[in-house]
Amino acid sequence: MSGLTIALAQVNPCVGDIAGNAALVRTSVRQAADAGASLVAFPEMVMTGYPIEDLALRESFQRAAERAVKALASGLEADGLGSTTVILGTLGVSKTGMPFNQAVVIRDGKVQARYNKHHLPNYGVFDERRIFAQGADRLVVDVDGRRVGVVICEDIWQDGGPVADMDDAGIDLLVVLNGSPFEEGKGRVRTDLARRRAAEVGAPLAYVNMWGGQDDLVFDGHSFIVAADGEWMANSPGFADALLTWTLPGAGESPVPSSVVDFASDDEQVYHAIVTGLRDYVTKNGFSSVVLGVSGGIDSALTATIAADAVGGENVVGVSMPSSFSSEHSKDDAADLAKRIGADYRVQPIAPMVDAFQQELALTGVPEENLQARVRGVILMAISNREGHLVIAPGNKSELATGYATIYDAGSIGGFAPLKDVDKSRVWELARWRNAVAAERGEVEPIPVNSIEKPPSAELRPGQTDQDSLPPYDLLDEVLDAYVEHAEGRAELLARGFDEAVVDKVLSLVDRAEWKRRQYPPGPKVTALAFGRDRRLPITSRWREKVEP
């Protein structure tokens, strides 16, 4: 028996764009066939995009997805590609009208087989049990005399699941369709799991994952193939379209690795995830440019650089909005940043507007500081309304956790927040990494060194710094990681040696800021626990962490 050439089509679908997604599939099948592939696999729910949330429950959407699948099958036949076996994810419907997360097998102009996802994740960002019905049947299809098993994403994460059911199926290849979101470090977990599952079935495992941004999720791709013994056969780069081909060996032949590329560093992957999330949020929602406040500080500098990498510096509008307390170096650093990334740079002083409010309100202290911040937010939204740019917020995860951001100000207003899941310490790390990449390429470093090195400050009163109100960021982020991401209570934090005053201050700030987080723009998830879908706590709650008896 000769070898079977397979292709994994790593594509970037868009939720709801069924016709556009079908066109992506059709183009990729042609490319795969030209490369000699007899089997082409696509990601989970590629026809509808993923996740589709309550769109799955709309009968009109269900019908549109099914029509598209059947039209694709007949279209491939008309293109002379009917003999190519295509496995792809879509929205299925039971006889009683319940939606399925489904894989279909297309060949000879028809849907030859269907498989409904067995295990529906109901943790973290997932709530599939609310939407989909559970599948039960096994799927093994014949492709040129080879037995190919098919499962979907979560099915391989459950011990004793559909993979175990294939022990006696004698499969030659296991194909896994995935819509697996990015989070730092997850790639290593995936590959270790895939090696175990390949060993269980005694066959190579082909893992095809989608890539691209969808609201607050980013899919990274990184499709790959491992042999039955766990040896690495092939893989795609992350955050890019890719068609990965590999030949399943024939009888008596040994598998041969191909298309093996190195994985990027953690910093590079996180940075690319954020760029991808922003770019796709902008473009998939019909925008072509963004606007943000540039203060000369590190958060706005990194955010503007990410935006320039995502949509081009010429499509970034950076607005400096100095107050009477703004330092000259901050204004200079903002201008320097804009020049480095090629942004449209504007200066709009806020003092006259603040004075107009003050003539009516006569605010002092924190209310006066917040007024300055909110005037900046109004300016950005006005420019957005006038010119059609998407406002992006440069606030980071540490600020969002502690509520150290004025609601409706330039740091928290807008449609998307690229650094929402990046703590302050990591902001500096990513800024230094991005500059180092530019230096290696012989390019101008995009972020002014002064923006990285100077103490962070909102500059809403004379001599203000963040550390007037917060613990040092390295300490703050360590406490936040324990409390927010690992759900450690006050007793555990004190037992770890954190200062009691610091613990009580941080916990109080976090607990009181839940209402602000609910109103914050979406931003790309890059850690194991992001604010939003991952962490759902009541706004109104009298629970407070305290020393337990």
Image (cartoon, rainbow, N blue to C red):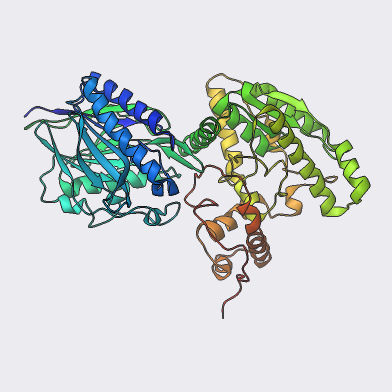
**Total number of numbered discs in the rendering:** 0
User: Of all residues shown, which one is farthest toward the bottom?
Assistant: 549
Q: Quadrant of the C terminus?
A: bottom right
Which residue occupies the extreme right position in the image? Answer: 359
Query: Please, is residue 308 above or below residue 460 in the view?
Result: above
Q: Name the quadrant containing residue 319.
A: top right
* Picture residue at 53% right of the left edge, 35% below the top: 281
Q: Residue at x 89, y 36 (%)?
A: 352
Along the horizontal axis of the image, is 548 left or right of 67?
A: right
In the image, residue 537 above or below residue 342: below
Residue 113 as seen in the image, left or right of residue 180: left
Closer to the camera in the image, 261 or 146: 146
Residue at horizontal 58 percent and vertical 23 percent from the top? 312
Residue 459 visible here? no
The percent position of residue 349, horizontal first and vertical second, equals: 83, 33
Q: Quadrant of the N terminus?
A: top left
Splitting the image into 4 quarters, where does residue 347 fall? Answer: top right
Front in this rendered view, residue 219 or 337: 219
Q: In this orientation, does residue 522 appear?
A: yes
User: Is 536 on the left-hand or right-hand side of 408?
Assistant: left
Q: Residue 61: x and y, percent?
A: 39, 41
Give me the residue at 56% from left, 43% from top. 523
Q: Nearer the viewer, residue 348 or 65?
A: 65
Q: Nearer the viewer, residue 539 or 511?
A: 539
Q: Position of residue 107 (x, y in %)?
A: 19, 31
Q: Position of residue 303 (x, y in %)?
A: 62, 35
The image quarter containing residue 395 is top right
